[in-house]
Amino acid sequence: MKKMLTDSELSAFAEQLAMILHSGISTLEGIMIMRDDTPQGPGREILDAVYQSLEETGDLADALESTEVFPEYFTRMTQIAERSGTLEDVMTSLFEYYSRQSTLMRSIRDALTYPLILLTMLFAVLIVLMTQVMPVFREVFDQLGIEMTGISAAVFRISGIVQRVSAVILVAVVILVIASLVMLRTGKGAPILTSAITRLPLGRRIARLLATSRFCKALALSLHSGLDMGESFELANSLTKHDEFEKSVKQANELMEQGNDLSTALRDAGIITGLNARMVTIGFRTGTAEIALDQISDNCQDEADVRIQSAVNMLEPTLTAILSILTGLILVSVMLPLLGVMANIG
């Protein structure tokens, strides 16, 4: 499987192509210019493949898809743009979208670097505590003839297990943290983290926002192109990648087939609500539905970005709290029996 382009690379590609199209140069000639200006390497090979395919078929979306390095969202949006004659506008939109994604991923990477290092240090402290300190206390209690019960006994049993496999645990944690840092620094880990966040219970709202953003953006372009509503829904829905949202889209499509207008169908299906539904209704009355949908898409994307950033920012204090509680529990389980012995001696 080929390596997919990063958000920053996709942003740069879309920006250059939008500038070329704005100057009046054809898509084929623009790709050729981009290829000739790119030094030898993987980037030039990709542009060369796009150019050859575009020269044969005249279809940019197919040319991009044939390279297997452009994400489906990019190729699908390009497909809609070609059919609607809005390739320059879509490339500008894709540039802004992937530029924002790149900034978000970089922010996530920077926010996670310190917690990962902190996690390694705290794990190291726990392992030292369990393998070096706890055995000393165990010897003291054995010499005093104190029999451990309850939590104290459980902690000492765990200490014995950790002592036998401490080297394996420490090496595994270090490798995991280093691998995570490398992935984040190369731009691969942050999208994985985003995907993981959206699968958590607290991340379902984020997943829904991202699906709504993509759907509204694609639907706005489809309506602008003059495509029929059924085809517009099919193209827009193919970008959501969200099972629950796809059911809502199907419901909205059925409502439209029953004679409801688009804004009513989207509202009753739960795709858009409140102010957003009102914006679409007014947009249809004034002939600016595409603008309203585009604005809704941007608003949903902004809210999703904020929620993702907040989820990442919560990671550091959460990890610190959990590991601090574990450390305190271990120390308390040792100190309480020891204090009891000292009280009896007193």
Image (cartoon, rainbow, N blue to C red):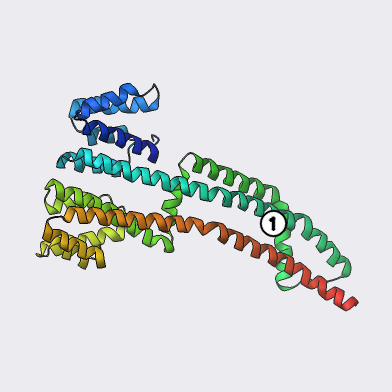
- In x, y percent, where is residue 221? 19, 48
- Quadrant in which the C terminus is drawn: bottom right
The answer to whether residue 20 is left or right of residue 3 is left
Q: Quadrant of residue 50?
A: top left
Give the residue drawn at x 85%, y 74%. Answer: 341
> Can I make out residue 251 in this image?
no
Label tally: 1
Of residues 193 and 151, the one nearer the viewer is 193
> Can I make out residue 260 in this image?
yes
Q: Quadrant of residue 95?
A: top left
- In x, y percent, where is residue 143? 88, 66
Of residues 153 and 343, the one nearer the viewer is 343
- In x, y percent, where is residue 227? 12, 48
Give the residue drawn at x 71%, y 65%. Answer: 330
Give the residue drawn at x 21%, y 27%. Answer: 28
Of residues 176 and 168, the one nearer the viewer is 176
Q: Is residue 49 above or below residue 288?
A: above
Instruction: Specify the farthest residue to the left.
Output: 259
Three-letter amino acid code at disc 1?
Leu
The answer to whether residue 294 is left or right of residue 44 is left
Q: Quadrant of residue 211?
A: bottom left
Give the labeled residue for mark 1: 126
